[in-house]
Amino acid sequence: MTDRSSLASSCVEALIKRVLPEGGFSMFPGGGFRADATAWAVLALSLAPSVERATGVIENGRSRLAASQSEDGRVSVSPSDPGPFWPTSLAILAWHGSSKYAKHRVRATDFLLRTTGKHWEKTENSPLAHDTSIHGWPWNQDTHSWVEPTSLSILALRTAGVGGHKRVLEGVRMLMDRQLPSGGWNYGNTIAFGTELLPQADCTGIALNALAGEVPQSDVEISLRYLKTQVTRLRTPLSLGWGILGLGAWGRRPGQATSWIGECLARQDLSGVYDTTLVSLLLLALEGKRGLEHLFR
Amino acid sequence: MRERTFARDTEGWTRREVLSGALGAAVASAGVSFLSGCTRRAGTAEVFIAQVGSYESDIASVVLSGLKELGVTEEEIRGKRILLKPNLIEPRRGAEHVNTHPLVIRGTAECFLRKGASSVLVAEGPGHTRDSLLVLGESGLGEVLRDDRIPFVDLNYVSGYPVTNTSRLTRLPALTLPVTLREVDWVVSVAKMKTHHWAGVTLSMKNLFGVMPGIYYGWPKNVFHWEGIAQSIIDINEAVKPSFAIVDGVVGMEGDGPIMGTPKHAGVLVMGRNLTAVDATCARVMGIDPKKVSYLAAASRRFGPIGESRIRQLGEAIGSVRTEFSLLERIDAHKGLRMS
């Protein structure tokens, strides 16, 4: 089974099994509500062009996300613990295209625009090479800004129509500062104690999605080359999914992408079923030939 | 074969200390903390050192011998659900010094099952990557777990439950633990013997950072860096209450650990019920003074002993396996750690 529509159908079928009767999605069949899983599933089901719209499921998912939004606009992993607010950017993406949730989206957008991580002026003898003063977004409040939450926030804010905001521009600058000298990104440290750290395909793919259209291709060419070598060999859903989307965002989607996604989905026989975020990511990688953001257009 | 030689080193050890150590171990295994928020003198403990020349050795037998020497009985293990917590930090192909070796996990799982455990699972929340499946694949652990039909739980994505932070060395009033911990009886830290550029060393206690779900604490688990690594190690160990530790020092890491350092063959597995004592012993094996490692100094006031006279060394003597792990001048956390 390697044709795109069959693979997409298998992803949709898997996602529908995680729909909760009260709205929203669980990570695995039989599990409880999770904001991150819900946002990813809504995103995948609403954006994939070849998927027949499961309108009720999508709307119920958006509604559940809205119900879990805090007064200040954030959407956290758990409503009882507001600290890990990183699903906020995912919720903005999931509410995209639905006027019913416009106010929720605005509140979440405002939250991201006024929120950042912990930052400080780098000292001369700092063991870290990156510029710690450039503001991005953290996973959790009162911590430093990192590559993945910053990339997702940039994507969310651009789709929300505030791509020109100074926070987005600074976030782009932060990502460029965190690009590894030898190419690619990891979670967000470049050189520590004089040693360059190693890149990771998933982080590289997500950063390249966020940077598409923001910087000249020559500035990220070294990372595109790194990512191309990785996706030919990696078959884990997170690395492959973001890898394909990252290359696609720069017009470099590999010709074998669909076949590789098929191989990746088939590996569930060995590794067990993928969680909702991973199935959603693969569905989006299957459909997003020019990266994640292009699906919103 | 030196791998199978487990000589006792009872020099300077009295019956009273043995009894005291056994009591300490019993208290620890019952999940009762020596300390809750105050400073108290730690008791004594036993630590077993086995020489293991390579990962091709019969590791299950080594671990079995260690359990026997440490007085871990079948009655204690029978019917218990065991969680093995390896150190899987980053995906690195062919780099056996980065992550706990798959064959150590296999041997440990086999040992606990032979002892009558009702189940063994492996669980980890890698600190530097969200792609745990990739770490499993690149480290070779995924293949071993599949072959042995041992389940793996990605703790980074598991929903959590709050527990009061009783030791409060950090400012965190509560910690969020993965629900998986509620479904097991024993947590066994199966760590790697490495130097660490922030903590000095990373051994069985620091390894428990990986229990804390990334969805709540991020990648890296930066909440704990801001709260202080040493303080966080204490709070997490107090909350998780691990029952046993095995440190893979067959090939460890020296220099710029925990990721970018170089392989160091120490040829040992170090194990015990008391993680503080295990880590102190590992430090000595590495040529590091445990009293100069800040988290161990703090742990010694709460969980167990780090003084050599209070740790009964079983198996190989430290002196026979000691090999200096290189420390780097440019790393502040390494300064002054070397044993005199």
Image: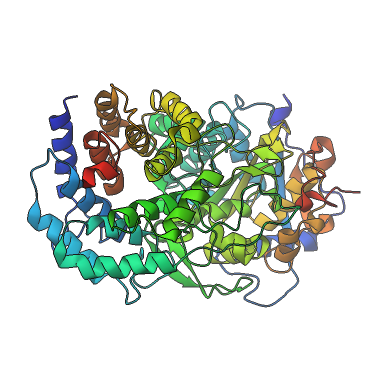
Q: Position of residue A112 (x, y in %)?
A: 39, 64
Residue B241 visible at all: no
Q: Is residue A45 left or right of residue B289?
A: left
Q: Residue at x 81, y 57 (%)?
A: B292
Q: Position of residue B254 (x, y in %)?
A: 73, 38
Q: Residue at x 59, y 50 (%)?
A: B207
Q: Depth check: give the residue in front, A160 or A145.
A: A160
Q: Residue at x 70, y 53 (%)?
A: B199
Q: Is residue B206 left or right of residue B329?
A: left
Q: Depth check: give the residue in front, A123 or A41.
A: A123
Q: Position of residue B234 (x, y in %)?
A: 63, 64
Quadrant assignment, res B42: bottom right
Residue at the right extreme, as displayed = B340
Quadrant assignment, res A231: top left
Q: Is residue A124 above or below residue B8?
A: below
Q: Is residue B115 above or below residue B230?
A: above
Q: Is residue B21 left or right of residue B291?
A: left
Q: Is residue B316 above or below residue A99?
A: above
